[in-house]
């Protein structure tokens, strides 16, 4: 279930891996340039490949402890993303998951597996405590 709130926050709730694709397009596609915050509620267990990439206005992201997997390119090129907390429950982050998130500054704790070391997860992100 997707809900775009007044303060352009996209709220997501449901069960399982969030794929976000409905009829070959994201439901919120017409709001791509307006979404400033994403709140993912408990029950979502994974974030699919590329599902939130290129959200230029996105600044903050809330990921619940039910999420264990963030797939390839999930938040790639979200150039204004500055605030994200990845919970200890996330044990796998795919290739280039946060590529191009140049304003991202906070650390990532609890991640025990990165899909590959040849393709950086945080290319161009300002992560200093990894």
Image (spheres, helix red, strand yellow):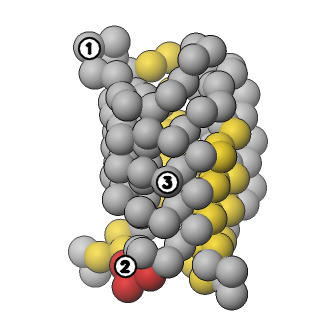
- For label 1, the SS is loop
- Residue pictured at 58% horizontal, 57% vertical: 59
Q: Where is residue 39? Give x, y as percent.
A: 68, 62
**In the rendered image of this protein, does residue 8 appear above or below residue 42?**
below
Tell me the distance, in whole angstroms, between the alpha carbons under discs 2 and 1. Answer: 31 Å
Q: Where is residue 95? Give x, y as percent.
A: 33, 30
Quick check: 44 left or right of 103? right
Can residue 74 be seen by looking at this rendering?
no
Task: Using the rendered view, name the quadrant where residue 124 is placed.
Answer: top left
Q: Where is residue 21? Give x, y as percent.
A: 35, 69
Residue corresponding to mark 2: 29
Q: Which of 105 and 8 is in front in this view?
A: 105
Task: Using the rendered view, name the quadrant where residue 12 is placed.
Answer: bottom right
- For label 2, the SS is helix
- Foreground mark, 3 or 2, reads 3
Q: Nearer the viewer, residue 10 or 70?
A: 10
Tell me the distance, in whole angstroms, between the alpha carbons under discs 3 and 2. Answer: 18 Å
Label disc, if present, on residue 118 of the rendered structure: 1
- For label 3, the SS is loop
What crowding class fits label 1: few (fewer than 14 Cα within 10 Å), some (14-19), or many (20 or more)? few
Q: In which quarter of the image is the C terminus?
A: top right
């Amino acid at each position: 279930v997707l809900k775009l709130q007044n303060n352009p926050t996209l709220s997501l709730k449901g069960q399982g891996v969030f794929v976000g694709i409905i009829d070959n397009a994201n439901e919120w596609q017409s709001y791509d340039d307006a979404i400033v915050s994403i709140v993912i509620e408990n029950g979502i267990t994974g974030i699919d490949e590329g599902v939130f990439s290129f959200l230029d206005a996105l600044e903050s992201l809330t990921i619940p402890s039910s999420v264990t997997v963030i797939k390839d390119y999930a938040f790639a090129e979200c150039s204004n993303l500055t605030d994200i907390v990845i919970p200890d429950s996330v044990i796998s982050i795919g290739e280039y998951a946060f590529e191009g998130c140049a304003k991202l500054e906070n650390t990532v704790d609890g991640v025990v597996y990165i899909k590959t070391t040849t393709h950086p997860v945080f290319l161009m992100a300002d992560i200093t405590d990894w």
